[in-house]
């Protein structure tokens, strides 16, 4: 009998993941969220990283907007949205990277991704509440991203100009997603931006002979010299692939569907660990030693991205191999990442699939990738 994935994912989201964060994350005294958790949910650090704060605002707002109109979810989103509105930006409107528990800035606004996540957070929160100030913040944050894009770290950039020529996958990837959401809310002018970011990915970062989506390229589309020019992050490529596939489905573009699935399959084929299963974190395409020491670890987020991506691809094309790969990812996640004793998922496994760290939240693991994948899968399977 085929597994009832819709029921499995709904139960996992609503009875495991969301309750863990509702119980442990909400800072009802100061506002915002805790996100450094030991295995049992106890807080081991009270600093508040901006990426994670904005992602949590987005996630609670998204649940409220798309799954159920639960007041507790909207209250949770408001807890972060108002705290960050009051404490998160400098005099230029740029978002800090790290705040203290009470909202004191701890790290300067050197990281432009703090601002990109602010855009989607306040856009989604604005949809949930109808509060105009939230939409204003989303638009203002996007404007600052555009203004800073050529030199995102500003005066805090430590690299010399010659080192900044490479195109990095992460920026067009997130901006493609951000501008698509803005276009849906505010109009076609943002859609034109989406197309430009997609063109950057396709023309500069993808090797169409293999379908591999590289992390770095030179402006002319050639590979940088050294390890950077051979670097694949399978999770990143898979995440980009489903961003593009969703867009292709929306506009009914069959050629774009084929290209996105080619990227998806290529990332899986190069990233899947044939010995121990699971997705390796980094790959050198020539088999040389990766520079990232965590290259052979199994992290939660590439697997959650793949969980939804292959389900979406299978739903789109009905290809049995895509369905098989979804099941491979599902089985690996349920066997290795879920913690039946304390709830939530482990984030960091060694190559053999055993937890390297027992934490459930940290500087990067937060209330985002796992619940987003589960929510997207539920909506797809239930056709909401």
Image (cartoon, grey):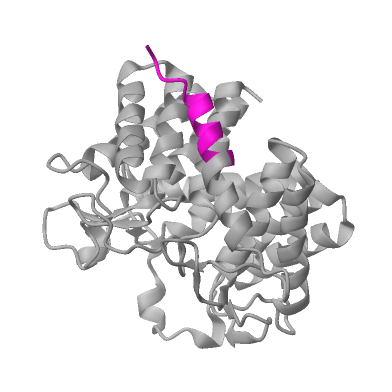
Q: Is residue 49 visible?
A: yes
Q: How many marks?
A: 0
Picture residue at 40% right of the left edge, 74% below the top: 164
Question: Vertical placement of 294 versus 353: above or below?
Answer: below
**What span is in magenta?**
1-14
Q: Is residue 113 left or right of residue 340?
A: right
Question: Vertical placement of 207 versus 95: above or below?
Answer: above
Q: Residue furthest front?
A: 341
What secondary structure prevails in the magenta region?
Answer: helix
Question: Vertical placement of 99 versus 220: above or below?
Answer: below
Q: Nearer the viewer, residue 151 or 61?
A: 61
Q: Measuring from the top left, give residue 104's x and y in whole percent.
A: 66, 86
Q: Is residue 259 magenta?
A: no
Q: Nearer the viewer, residue 149 or 58?
A: 58
Q: Residue furthest top?
A: 1
Q: Measuring from the top left, give residue 251's x and y in whole percent.
A: 61, 27
Q: Which quadrant of the rendered structure holds the N terminus?
A: top left
Q: Nearer the viewer, residue 261 or 128?
A: 128
Q: Is residue 187 visible?
A: no
Question: Vertical placement of 66 versus 149: above or below?
Answer: above
Picture residue at 56% right of the left edge, 64% below the top: 52
Q: Is residue 297 left or right of residue 129?
A: left
Q: Measuring from the top left, give residue 318's x and y in whole percent.
A: 41, 15
Picture residue at 58% right of the left edge, 62% below the top: 24
Q: Which quadrant of the rendered structure holds the C terminus?
A: top right
Q: Measuring from the top left, give residue 8's x and y in whole percent.
A: 48, 29
Tell me which corner region of the image, top left, top right, bottom left or bottom right, holds residue 293.
bottom left
Picture residue at 44% right of the left edge, 53% below the top: 342
């Amino acid at each position: 009998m085929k597994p009832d994935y819709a029921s499995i994912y709904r139960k996992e989201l609503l009875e495991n993941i969301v309750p863990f964060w509702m119980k442990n994350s909400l800072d009802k005294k100061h506002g915002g969220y805790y996100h450094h958790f030991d295995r049992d949910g106890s807080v081991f650090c009270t600093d508040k990283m901006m990426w994670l704060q904005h992602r949590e605002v987005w996630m609670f707002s998204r649940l409220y907007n798309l799954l159920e109109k639960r007041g507790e979810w909207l209250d949770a989103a408001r807890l972060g949205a108002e705290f960050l509105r009051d404490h998160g930006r400098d005099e230029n409107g740029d978002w800090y990277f790290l705040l203290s528990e009470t909202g004191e800035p701890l790290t300067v606004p050197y990281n432009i991704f703090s601002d990109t996540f602010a855009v989607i957070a306040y856009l989604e929160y604005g949809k949930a509440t109808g509060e105009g100030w939230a939409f204003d913040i989303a638009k203002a944050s996007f404007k600052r991203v555009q203004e800073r894009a050529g030199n995102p770290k500003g005066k805090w950039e430590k690299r010399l100009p010659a080192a900044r020529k490479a195109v990095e996958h992460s920026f067009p990837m997130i901006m493609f997603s951000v501008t698509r959401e803005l276009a849906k809310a505010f109009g076609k002018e943002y859609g034109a931006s989406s197309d430009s970011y997609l063109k950057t990915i396709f023309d500069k970062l993808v090797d169409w002979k293999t379908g591999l989506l590289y992390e770095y390229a030179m402006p002319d589309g050639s590979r940088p010299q050294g390890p950077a020019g051979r670097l694949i992050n399978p999770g990143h490529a898979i995440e980009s692939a489903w961003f593009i596939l969703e867009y292709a489905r929306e506009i009914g573009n069959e050629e774009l569907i084929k290209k996105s699935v080619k990227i998806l399959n290529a990332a899986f084929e190069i990233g899947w660990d044939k010995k121990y299963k699971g997705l390796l974190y980094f790959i050198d395409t020539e088999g040389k030693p990766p520079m990232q020491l965590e290259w052979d670890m199994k992290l939660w987020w590439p697997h959650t991205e793949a969980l939804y991506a292959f389900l979406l691809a299978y739903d789109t094309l009905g290809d049995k191999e895509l369905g098989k790969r979804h099941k491979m990812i599902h089985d690996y996640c349920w066997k290795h990442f879920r913690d039946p004793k304390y709830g939530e998922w482990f984030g960091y496994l060694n190559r053999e699939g055993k937890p390297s760290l027992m934490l459930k939240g940290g500087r990067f693991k937060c209330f985002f990738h796992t619940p987003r994948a589960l929510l997207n899968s539920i909506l797809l399977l239930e056709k909401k």
